[in-house]
Image: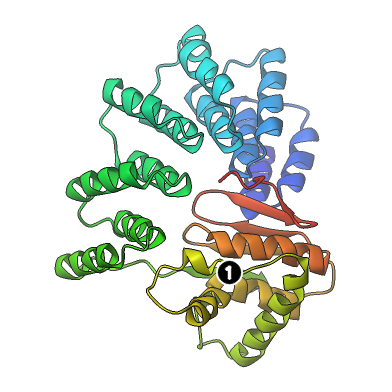
Amino acid sequence: MVGNALVNMYAKSGSIQDAWKAFSGMNFRDIITWNVMICGFSHHGLGKEALEVFEEMMVAGEVPNRITFVGVLHACSHMGFVEQGRYYFHHLMKRFNVEPNLLHYTCVVGLLSKAGLFEEVESFMREAPVQWDVVAWSSLLNACYVRRNYSLGKKVAEYAIEMYPNNSGIYILLSNIHAKSKEWDGVARVRSLMKERRVKKEPGVSWIGIRNQTHTFLSEDNQHSDIALIYAKVKEVLSKIRPLGYAPDVAGGYHDVDEEQSESNLSYHSEKLAVAYGLMKTPENSPLYVTKNVRICGDCHSAIKLISRLSNRLIVVRDSNRFHHFKDGQCSCCDYW
């Protein structure tokens, strides 16, 4: 039990390598041990490692259960292993008499939609013997946004809003789809509907722990005691990564403002503020661990990749969906998120 708790603690705190060390040092493992490691690797986007542990578990003679297959299907989804995911869901689960539930069906929705197989997703969702929840619809909607299937995204969002009128995330994704299409009237309609229904957008918040103290940042924050120095650090770092290829994603701005204002808005997102503060307050080359309550945005993702290269640091960002490990200008998600 202690070993399982250690593996789980390290995995959830972002130290997946320490989780692996704890797992490897255990002389006895039960189904919980295997599941925690598989799901840990999966949550960190390390799909190959998760599936390798699953194969090792099979060799060891442990029988997988529902949680095992949630981790395995998530791993396939994060890596785009469509064929393997289909095999696990349609064949291997039956072989072990594991009856799929809503979680497994939702994993398949994520797997197929992230791969851009929208016709298959539509057919799968129509035929599945489950009542879809907001997680499944949000997964499909986010894939429509990332894959630029805006026409389907609008249909999905409108249906989901009728089903879940108080879920702010669906409104925001629909608003973002309109913004990407430069349909500012559509953005205005969504915001008006949110106001009418008193639906409030969840603000983007990021946390970083330094010397046993947690520092919290909101986008364009001005509450932190060191905010002037943090803004200066952000400006300095962004100027240094421009020669490395960074270009602010002003085309992806979600407000009808000029390019200069859009760039300014992007510069002070909460995760950039947290990373900048970490660079200021921690020893050189030490890793940074940042948590965010919503998905990391594309511009911050691109910027932090280059910041990791510039600073020669490991930067781990846990957003609402998964962990991103930034190192040497690359991310563990391989830009598939």
Q: Residue at x 53, y 18 (%)?
A: 88
The spot of residue 71 in percent (x, y) is 55, 32
The spot of residue 57 in percent (x, y) is 68, 20
The spot of residue 229 in percent (x, y) is 66, 90
User: 163 and 33: which one is in front?
Assistant: 163
Q: Residue at x 39, y 24 (%)?
A: 120
**Mark 1, other Cα within 10 Å: few <14 / some 14–19 / many ≥20:** many
Q: Residue at x 63, y 42 (%)?
A: 45
Is 87 drawn above or below residue 184 in the view shown? Answer: above
One can see residue 1 in this view: no
Check the picture and name the quadrant holding the N terminus. Answer: top right
User: 244 and 21: which one is in front?
Assistant: 244
Is 249 drawn above or below residue 225 in the view shown? Answer: above
One can see residue 81 in this view: yes
Secondary structure, mark 1, is helix
Is 98 drawn above or below residue 8 in the view shown? Answer: above
The amino acid at mark 1 is: Glu
Judged left or right of residue 142, residue 290 is right
Judged left or right of residue 239, residue 81 is left
Q: Residue at x 45, y 16 (%)?
A: 98
Residue with the mark numbered 1: 271
The spot of residue 43 in percent (x, y) is 59, 43
Q: Quadrant of residue 238?
A: bottom right
Q: How many marks?
A: 1
